[in-house]
């Protein structure tokens, strides 16, 4: 066989190999793209890491979260008559998924501009209900909102306890949370406690003292901004 024939055969085999590769990629395009593109949940984890230093290790799972330098604090400022800050700390050893979720939402600005929509004197003040938000959530923020599996634990509902609100079913907590203003044993192990007020309980008590119509404040009390920071 002449050298020029060998060269032509090599080209032919090369073309066939390219065509076969193209055919395989097209017929397996879904699987191929899945290998080339990052998983959606990984994208959100990366976004979480880049958005705030305090949530950095929390994005990668419970083991990292439990080694994190706690407490992490969320400082919040309310509007006009309630401009003082207050700080809450978390208990990830008791409710790791709730803590991780709360920090992720706070880092993304989900709670900014929500209102204290429920005030029950001698019981709780509640916020984080998305319909009360001054501006609609962005598409990216909306993707972070989901129901959580209950993590009921042995922490008590006493003054300053931070706990997640939910519907009748246990696994329906998502964004709304409340702060207890007086002992409430009837809530123990029925709602997920995930933190407590570390400082500024007097701000919570000011909110509790606001005039109400039923359980709704007469005037809007807005949660201006939530900032996650290391202590």
Image: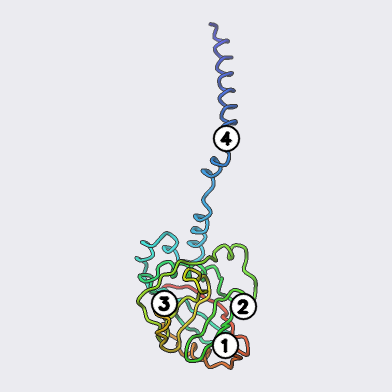
Q: Residue furthest right?
A: 135
Q: Secondary structure at mark 1?
A: loop
As displayed, is residue 115 above or below residue 206? above
Measure how far apart labels 2 and 4 are at the Cα level. Answer: 48 Å
Question: Looking at the image, which residue is at 56% across and 19% down?
Answer: 13
Corner quadrant of residue 153: bottom left
Of residues 24 and 229, which is closer to you in this image?
24
- Return the disc, 4 or 3, that comes first in the chain's sequence: 4
- Return the disc, 3 or 1, that comes first in the chain's sequence: 3
Q: Secondary structure at mark 3?
A: strand
Measure how far apart labels 3 and 2 are at the Cα level. Answer: 23 Å
Q: Position of residue 10 (x, y in %)?
A: 55, 17
Q: Residues within 10 Å of mark 2 (few under 14, many from 20)?
A: some
Question: Label 1 belongs to which residue?
Answer: 215
Measure how far apart labels 4 and 3 are at the Cα level. Answer: 50 Å
Question: Looking at the image, which residue is at 49% across and 59% down?
Answer: 45
Residue 12 is left or right of residue 155, and the answer is right
Q: Nearer the viewer, mark 2 or mark 1?
A: 1
Of residues 85 and 195, which is closer to you in this image?
195
Corner quadrant of residue 90: bottom left
Question: Label 4 belongs to which residue?
Answer: 25
- Return the disc, 4 or 1, that comes first in the chain's sequence: 4
Residue 195 is left or right of residue 146, and the answer is left
- Return the disc, 2 or 1, that comes first in the chain's sequence: 2
Numbered badge on residue 132: 2
Question: Label 3 belongs to which residue?
Answer: 195
- Return the disc, 3 or 2, that comes first in the chain's sequence: 2
Q: Residues within 10 Å of mark 3 (few under 14, many from 20)?
A: many
Q: Position of residue 144 (x, y in %)?
A: 54, 64
Q: Secondary structure at mark 4?
A: helix
Q: Residues within 10 Å of mark 1 (few under 14, many from 20)?
A: some
Measure how far apart labels 3 and 1 are at the Cα level. Answer: 24 Å
């Amino acid at each position: 066989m002449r050298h020029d024939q060998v060269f032509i055969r090599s080209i032919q085999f090369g073309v066939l190999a390219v065509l076969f590769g193209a055919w395989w990629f097209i017929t397996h395009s879904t699987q191929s793209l899945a290998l080339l593109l990052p998983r959606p949940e990984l994208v959100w984890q990366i976004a979480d890491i880049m958005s705030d230093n305090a949530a950095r290790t929390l994005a990668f799972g419970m083991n990292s979260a439990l080694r994190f330098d706690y407490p992490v604090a969320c400082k919040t400022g309310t509007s006009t008559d309630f401009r003082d800050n207050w700080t809450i700390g978390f208990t990830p050893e008791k409710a790791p998924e709730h803590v991780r979720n709360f920090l992720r939402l706070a880092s993304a600005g989900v709670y900014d501009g929500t209102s204290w929509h429920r005030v029950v004197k001698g019981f709780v003040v509640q916020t984080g209900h998305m319909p009360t938000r001054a501006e609609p959530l962005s598409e990216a923020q909306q993707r972070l909102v989901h129901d959580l599996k209950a993590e009921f634990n042995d922490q008590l509902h006493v003054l300053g306890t931070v706990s997640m609100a939910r519907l009748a079913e246990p696994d329906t907590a998502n964004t709304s949370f409340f702060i207890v203003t007086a002992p409430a044993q009837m809530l123990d192990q029925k709602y997920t406690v995930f933190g407590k007020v570390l400082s500024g309980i007097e701000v919570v008590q000011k909110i509790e003292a606001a005039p109400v119509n039923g359980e709704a404040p007469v005037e809007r009390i807005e949660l201006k901004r939530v900032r996650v920071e290391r202590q």
